[in-house]
Amino acid sequence: MNYKEAKKYFKNEWKKTATDIDWLLYPKGSFDWNALHEWVKNEATSDEGMPKLEAVSFHLLNPNGLTNQLPNDIDDFSFINENGDERFASGCFILSFRNENSHYKKLSKAFPKFNNFSMWDLNHSLEGLKKDIKESWEFMANSKFNLNGKHRAIAKLAEINNIKEAK
């Protein structure tokens, strides 16, 4: 179900449960915004047809959103050194981490208020995220260190390449 179909579904659900007072308040009808937002947050599979607010919400909160495709487990960046000690890879590795990504930060700041956040800003952040996702997983997969997340990075890269080939 895409966004337009979901909105229509929640409008029909509102009509079934609306009282006389609801119809007085909203003579043209309405829909359950909370249910629609929950659908965007949890069940949507793509941001196709979504307005800016829902698209940002989708990419920040939904498991299918772009921010959830960035490496986000801190343990993925640790490795065992020659002495057998577990160490944390710092420096440029930390730039691959989700919370340090500039596009993620930009979307996070825009989410609650949307002041001065245009559709161009949204598209720019999403394109940057797509590029950063591939680069961070490639960086982890090609690392000279034996990172704990290296096997996940190799699998994720294969998945990303299969998606591109399918298009």
Image (cartoon, rainbow, N blue to C red):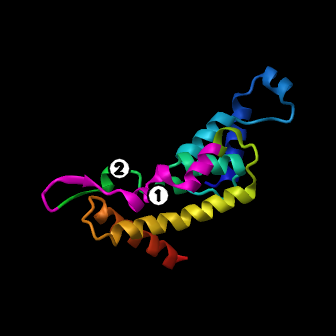
For the residues labelled 1 and 2, the Cα–Cα distance comes to 14 Å
Q: Nearer the viewer, mark 1 or mark 2?
A: 2
Q: Please state which amino acid type lies under the numbered disc 2.
A: Ile
Badge 1 amino acid: Gln
Quadrant showing the N terminus = bottom right
Task: Give me the residue at 39% from left, 59% from top.
Answer: 91
Q: Quadrant of the C terminus?
A: bottom right
The image shows residue 37 at horizontal and vertical percentages of: 63, 40
Q: Position of residue 150 (x, y in %)?
A: 30, 64
As drawn, the residue found furthest toward the top would be: 21
Q: Residue furthest left?
A: 83
- For disc 2, the marked residue is 74
Q: Which type of secondary structure does the marked residue at label 1 adopt?
A: helix
Identity of the residue drawn at 56% across and 52% down: 104
Q: Which residues are magenta?
A: 82-109
Give the residue number, with chain letter if any, for mark 1: 69
Q: Earlier in the sequence, mark 1 or mark 2?
A: 1
The x and y percentages for residue 47 are 63, 56
* Number of dots carrying numbers: 2
161 left or right of 65? left
